[in-house]
Amino acid sequence: MEQRTLTRKQLYELAWKKPMMHIAKEFGFSDRGLGKLCTKYEITIPPRGYWMCLKAGQKIKIPALKKIAWCSDDKVIVESKASKPQNTELFEKLKQEKNTLSTIIFDKKSQKYHPLVKSWNDIDKLNKYVKIDVRARKVLSLVLFELENRGYAISETNEDNRRIAKVSLNEDYVTLIVKKYSISYKRKVQPSDGWDWEWRKSDNDLKYVTEETPYLKISVYGKYYWEPRDYKETEDITIEQAISKAILYVIKKIDKLKNERLEKERQDKIRECRQRQIQTYNDFIKEQENIRQKYIKYENYKRQKLLEDSKKWKELCIVIEFLDHIKKHNDASDNEWLDWAYSYLNDINPTNNKYFRNYNNYEKNEDKSYPSHS
């Protein structure tokens, strides 16, 4: 749909030329939504029954467009909504298939069965209690042959203990069943109904009756088993028409499933990429936090070391004062001991460059816990 716009005056003129439903369809709106827009901009629209009266030849006076102060007649008030891009390739393919499928003829006398269906017939012949619906199997064979010619793979799947044909293309598939269908309706209770007849309340009592029809239906199941699409044979619809519609739906459905799968894979990749980004960011934050904690721990270690060294220096000052006192009043026998004491003090003096601000032992004492000084 190409982008179109309407001014207030153009919408007024168009509203009196064609029904609102048609205008709304052209611009991608609902007729009710367009009617609300006309009410908002005070545009008089045709009353109910106007078009029937016009068709009957009656002349109806068209009211003039009222001018409003807050909105000019040239103001654009309607913009057509851009439609979703259509799958032109699928559209052309379905168009081509319609012409091809219009030539399908179902031969009742044909004995040609699809290998999958023939294997079912051979199994059923061994069991006398299983009824073989020959016509249903022939119709299913024709459908499977047509789909196989179009490049679809045919296999068997067992769901609810029923033999179902599986039609697949790459990873996408649908399942098919062909069988007779029943119709349900209400009718009056009759004497032949036995118990219902005996216990009826009045002659107008109704009961549900289910009757099996001689017609077939082709059920196509997509991703979920509980939402089938049925194509029924009726008095007005031939089995060839039902087959054509079913094949077209299978082509369209598998293409839709493929697009949904690809979109899901794309969304999964986007989600996975986002998760990787979040994980990378979280790892970065965690690494920065670890660096910060190590820095805090190292700072605490240096502070603690400083406090320890200051205490040692204070103790050392007391010892030096003590040794100076002994040296002042010493005997000759104490010289050797004093030399040793002064050399030891020189080794443990925290103000010496050999010892002061030496943090090489931090890695060895990293597991040791130090109080934090904030």
Image: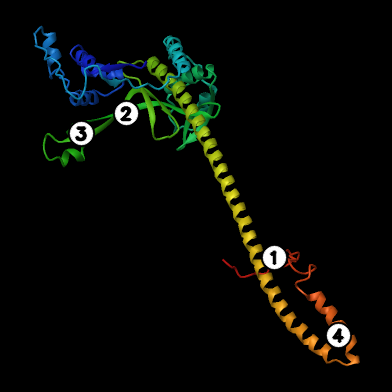
Q: Is residue 64 above or below residue 294?
A: above
- In the drawing, does residue 13 fall left or right of residue 124? left
Label 1: which secondary element: loop
Q: Quadrant of the C terminus?
A: bottom right
Q: Disc number at residue 182?
A: 2
Residue drawn at 65 percent across, 68 percent down: 303
How far across and down, in percent of the image, does residue 173 sit?
50, 28
Which of 356/225 is in front? 356
Determine which residue is flagged by label 4.
338
Q: Residues within 10 Å of mark 3 (few under 14, many from 20)?
A: few
How far across and down, in percent of the image, does residue 68 sit?
16, 22
The three-letter amino acid code for the residue at tag 1 is: Glu
Residue drawn at 12 percent across, 34 percent down: 204
How far across and down, in percent of the image, does residue 27 sit?
30, 19
Determine which residue is flagged by label 3.
192
Q: Nearer the viewer, mark 3 or mark 2?
A: 2
| Residue 95 lies in quadrant | top left
Counting residues from the N terminus, which is met first, the one under dot 3 or under dot 2? 2
Q: CA distance from mark 4 to mark 3?
A: 135 Å
How far across and down, in percent of the image, does residue 45 sit?
16, 19
The three-letter amino acid code for the residue at tag 2 is: Ser
Which of 229/189 is in front? 229
Q: Residues within 10 Å of mark 4 (few under 14, many from 20)?
A: some
The three-letter amino acid code for the residue at tag 3 is: Ser
Determine which residue is flagged by label 1.
366
Q: CA distance from mark 1 to mark 3?
A: 98 Å
Q: Is residue 109 above or below residue 117?
A: above
Q: Nearer the viewer, mark 4 or mark 3?
A: 4
Q: Nearer the viewer, mark 1 or mark 3?
A: 1
Q: CA distance from mark 3 to mark 2?
A: 21 Å
